[in-house]
Image: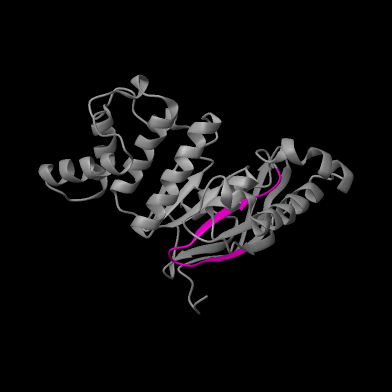
């Protein structure tokens, strides 16, 4: 890793006060992210994964510490980063067509001509394989197609950093696989830096160059695990590789320990917990 990381998280804390009581969600998270990497963040339920991502996105202030992108402190949503929300039904405008939803971000972020907006809108609709659906409304699309629209709208602004908060959790298993492959392809083709928050350890290992495991609250980095799996990856053969299974064992073991499960409980629960850790 270079001396000056592309994205740097230093001693980030987040505390909430209510009714005279203070709850510490993040206890001092330190993390460096290289340009072009794909980093997934997992951890026990309620440990503050989404909170950390919102702080990185400039959507929420930290109680302490700081986030820097290219050595600039993040105090508001940085132009270099785009946030993709978990609930696509809340991120798309139901009264706008696919074309108008994708164009919306461009119209509000960049000084493009009308023709420039139109050209880039259609470019990114094509990238997410939604050609022919430009005039459809969100309610006329499947859940997976709606999330593709949300991804196209984010990428049309040509961010350097894509921040994704459990973006596949609201779709069925086969649609989820298709979206995973889409994001993996776009990450490679566009040279993005991706930070993904997910509950699914299998997903995290399959997609990522690194998996970061947070501890229970107050969260700190428990494991920072480089993922050395060859590309291109395959949903079946990659997941059968001994190295993949070693990563899975290590990450799940740490998560089960954080949740207070004994080793025997962890072994018995592993099949059911693959998508919920």
Residue 255 location in percent, x, y? 74, 49
Magenta segment, principal secondary structure? strand
Quarter of the figure that contains the C terminus: top right
Percent of width and height locating residue 49:
61, 48
Question: Residue 101's quadrant in the figure?
Answer: top left
Q: Is residue 3 above or below residue 143?
A: below
**What span is in magenta?**
30-44
Colour scheme used in the picture?
one colour
Q: Is residue 137 magenta?
A: no
Residue 51 visible: no
- Where does residue 113 sit, x and y in percent of width and height? 11, 46
Counting labels gives 0
Residue sitting at 73 percent across and 49 percent down? 252
Q: Position of residue 116 (x, y in %)?
A: 14, 47
Q: Is residue 46 visible?
A: yes
Between 103 and 64, the residue placed more toward the observer is 103
Tell me if residue 275 comes above or below residue 142 in the rendering: below
Q: Is residue 224 left or right of residue 111?
A: right
On the rendered structure, is 22 left or right of 260?
A: left
Residue that sits furthest to the top in the current view: 140
Which residue is found at the position 54% from the left and 63% from the top?
Answer: 66
**Compared with residue 21, is residue 90 higher up or lower down, i.e. above or below?**
above
Residue 217 or 1: which is nearer the viewer? 1
Depth order, front residue of 158/95:
158
Magenta highlight on residue 32 = yes
Residue occupying the point 60% across, 53% down? 205
Q: Nearer the viewer, residue 59 or 277?
A: 277
């Amino acid at each position: 890793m270079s001396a000056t990381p592309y994205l740097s998280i230093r001693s980030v804390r987040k505390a909430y006060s209510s009714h005279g009581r203070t709850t510490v969600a993040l206890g001092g998270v330190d993390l460096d992210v290289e340009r072009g990497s794909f980093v997934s963040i997992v951890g026990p339920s309620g440990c503050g994964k989404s909170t950390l991502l919102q702080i990185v996105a400039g959507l929420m202030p930290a109680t302490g510490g700081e986030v820097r992108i290219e050595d600039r402190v993040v105090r508001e949503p940085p132009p270099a980063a785009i946030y993709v929300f978990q609930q696509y039904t809340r991120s798309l405008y139901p009264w706008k067509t696919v074309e108008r939803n994708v164009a919306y971000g461009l119209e509000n972020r960049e000084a493009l001509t009308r023709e420039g907006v139109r050209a880039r809108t259609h470019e990114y609709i094509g990238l997410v394989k939604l050609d022919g659906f430009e005039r459809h409304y969100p309610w006329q699309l499947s859940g997976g197609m709606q999330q593709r629209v949300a991804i196209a709208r984010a990428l049309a602004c040509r961010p350097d950093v894509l921040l994704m908060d459990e973006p596949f959790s609201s779709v069925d298993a086969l649609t989820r696989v298709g979206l995973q492959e889409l994001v993996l392809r776009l990450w490679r083709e566009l040279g993005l830096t991706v930070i993904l928050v997910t509950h699914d350890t299998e997903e995290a290992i399959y997609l990522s160059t690194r998996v970061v495991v947070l501890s229970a609250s107050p969260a700190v980095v428990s494991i920072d695990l480089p993922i050395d799996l060859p590309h291109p990856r395959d949903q079946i053969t990659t997941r059968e590789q001994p190295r993949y299974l070693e990563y899975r064992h290590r990450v799940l073991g740490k998560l089960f320990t954080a949740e207070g499960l004994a080793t025997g409980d962890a072994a018995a629960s592993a099949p059911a917990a693959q998508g919920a850790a």
